[in-house]
Amino acid sequence: MLTSERKALIADRLRRDGRLVAKAFAEELDLSEDTIRRDLREMAAEGLLARVHGGALPVQPALPDFAARKEVASGEKQRLGKLAATLVQPGQTVFLDGGTTNAEIARALPRDFAFTLVTHSPTIAAELEHHPTADVILIGGRIYKHSMVAVGAIASAAIATMRPDLFFLGVTAVHAHHGFTTGDVEEAAIKRQIAAQSGRTYVALTAEKLERVSPVTIMPLEAAAGVIVSGRAVAEQLEAIGSAGLEVLVG
């Protein structure tokens, strides 16, 4: 088998399964494990996959900084934000995570009834400056600038006192096998804490986040109540998410 053929098979397996175990894949193709590991090293050097112990994962493209992300897929994020905001009910306590998609949720929040909005993102809080009915609680702590959210012990202690009805979680990637992931350990820990204390967790997802994996796990798919997914998602991606028992809202 030619090297190009092996690498094409590796890429196909990563797209299908979201991971590849070098030993099992070598046995399946009746090749040496060293051959497959060499292919994985070469593909990792080309940025085509992420090497992990024993195999490989799909690569999650590096995200631009927060300011640049505001301009990425803005129309898609607006549609997701408007759909997500319909989940908010009068009198609820809603925790809104940071991120540019969640900023669109903030802009679309209902203005005809009262509710409490909790966030650990100063940029999200600023979106609610002129909201007529939202009572806004801002959680403090050390700012993780990439996502503009508070993390660390101070934030965790304040969040421990909260019991939100609804949490809109922000992620950088979601995968049927690896769940919801992000790029920073401390940020993931805070997100996990909020989700554990919330009645229901929903995740708004632009199409490029589907079937991707970032370095740090937040939680498995089944820990969320549902997802708000872009209409650009393909049927296979929606089926993979829905099979975990999540409510899937398509915007």
Image: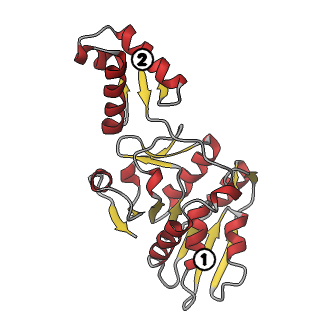
Q: How would you rate the neighbour count of disc 2 (Cα within 10 Å): few for under 14, some for 14-19, many for 20 or more?
A: some
Closer-to-camera residue (104/202): 104
* Amino acid type shown at disc 1: Arg
Provide the secondary structure element on which disc 1 rests: helix
Residue designated by label 2? 39
Q: How would you rate the neighbour count of disc 1 (Cα within 10 Å): few for under 14, some for 14-19, many for 20 or more?
A: some
Q: What number is the disc on residue 232?
A: none
| Side (left or right) of 55 relative to 81 | left
Image quadrant assignment for residue 38: top left
Say which residue appears at 50% left-offset and 57% top-offset. 195
Say which residue appears at 40% left-offset and 46% top-offset. 211
Q: What number is the disc on residue 107?
A: 1
Pick out the residue farthest to the bottom.
112
Residue 96 shows up from this direction: no
Image quadrant assignment for residue 161: bottom right
State the quadrant of the N terminus.
top left
* Amino acid type shown at disc 2: Asp
Give how far across and how far down residue 193 sits, in percent: 55, 53
Image quadrant assignment for residue 74: bottom right
Above or below residue 227? Residue 15 is above
Say which residue appears at 36% left-offset and 67% top-offset. 250
Say which residue appears at 31% left-offset and 31% top-offset. 13
Above or below residue 153? Residue 42 is above
Given this view, does label 2 or label 1 mark the residue nearer the observer?
2
Give how far across and how far down residue 46 sits, in percent: 53, 26
